[in-house]
Image: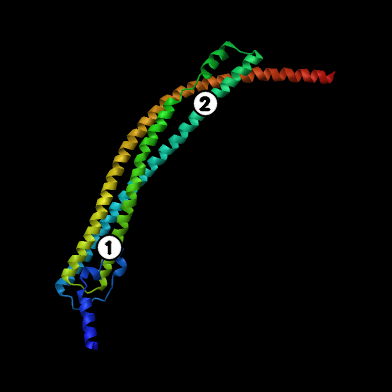
């Protein structure tokens, strides 16, 4: 085979490659772009179209940047709301622990008071309430409802993974498209094909963002109403807990007086014996 034949076959093979095969702006094909400096062969009409496309890309970039700022702000709001619910769960656990500990300690105090035969009528009434099984079901319900609602945040995080992927594809497509327009010699037909590729990536990213924003808006709105409901339940349960707390504090005060007097008497007897 002659050299001319080999050269001709090589040229035909190169021409056989479609424009889409030589140039891709999607993420998965970003490494296959082969660039060549733009020459003066491009027509004036094509150059004007390229300039218009570059201007359009800049406008898209600015608009998408604003949309992402709103998205980021809304995402932080949801994170902040999720953190509040986590703190409420910790608070509920602490209240439950304190309620149970107060009950067990009251029972122990009751046994001690009976052994020491120092029960008063006031202490008897307080111990009757404090030694009963504490009511913690409302707190358990609050915690369960919060856990159920927080599943919504997990769903949003799952959608965020898809959104991040689409955003990354968009950013790479934007970068590659701008690079192609800047340095490559392309025809109007090739420009249209590149624009179609980019618009597909942009469409996917915009739809992914809009769907996620809608979910976050609904979650925030419902979450704030739910938070108000939870705060009302906590307020009512705290009032009942405060009543028990007052009775428990009164019991502690009475025990302090009883056993302090006993301690003083013991110390006086001890001093008397030592002096003898």
The outermost residue toward the top is: 121
Residue in the image at 28% along x and 52% along y:
67
Left or right: 82, with 180 as reference point: right
Q: Is residue 181 visible?
A: no
Left or right: 59, with 93 as reference point: left
Residue in the image at 31% along x and 40% along y:
219
Residue in the image at 42% along x and 26% along y:
138
Numbered disc total: 2
The outermost residue toward the front is: 1
Q: Quadrant of residue 275?
A: top right
Look at the picture and state if 88 lies above or below 109: below
Q: Could you tell me residue 251's position as x and y percent?
A: 57, 19
Q: Could you tell me residue 245's position as x and y percent?
A: 51, 23
The residue under label 2 is: 100
The quarter of the image holding the N terminus is bottom left
Left or right: 152, with 250 as reference point: left
The residue under label 1 is: 26
The outermost residue toward the right is: 276
- Between 21 and 235, the residue placed more toward the observer is 21
- Between 114 and 218, the residue placed more toward the observer is 114
The quarter of the image holding the C terminus is top right
Q: Could you tell me residue 37's position as x and y percent?
A: 26, 76
């Amino acid at each position: 085979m002659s050299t001319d034949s080999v050269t001709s076959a090589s040229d035909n093979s190169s021409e056989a490659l479609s424009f889409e095969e030589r140039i891709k702006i999607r993420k998965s094909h970003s490494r296959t772009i082969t660039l060549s400096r733009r020459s003066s062969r491009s027509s004036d009409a094509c150059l004007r179209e390229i300039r218009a496309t570059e201007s359009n890309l800049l406008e898209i970039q600015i608009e998408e940047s604003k949309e992402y700022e709103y998205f980021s702000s809304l995402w932080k709001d949801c994170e902040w709301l999720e953190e509040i619910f986590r703190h409420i769960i910790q608070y509920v656990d602490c209240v439950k622990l304190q309620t149970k500990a107060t009950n067990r300690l009251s029972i122990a105090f009751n046994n001690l008071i009976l052994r020491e035969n120092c029960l008063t009528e006031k202490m008897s009434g307080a111990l009757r309430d404090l030694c009963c099984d504490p009511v913690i079901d409302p707190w358990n319900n609050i915690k369960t409802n919060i856990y159920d609602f927080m599943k919504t945040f997990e769903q949003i995080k799952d959608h965020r993974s898809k959104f991040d992927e689409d955003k990354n594809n968009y950013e790479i497509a934007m970068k590659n498209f701008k690079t192609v327009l800047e340095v490559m010699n392309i025809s109007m037909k090739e420009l249209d094909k590149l624009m179609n590729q980019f618009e597909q990536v942009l469409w996917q990213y915009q739809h992914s963002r809009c769907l996620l924003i809608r979910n976050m808006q609904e979650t925030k709105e419902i979450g704030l109403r739910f938070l108000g409901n939870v705060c009302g339940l906590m307020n009512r349960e705290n009032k009942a807990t405060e009543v028990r707390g007052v009775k428990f504090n009164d019991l502690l005060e009475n025990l302090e007086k009883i056993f302090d007097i006993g301690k003083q008497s013991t110390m006086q007897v001890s001093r008397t014996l030592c002096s003898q």
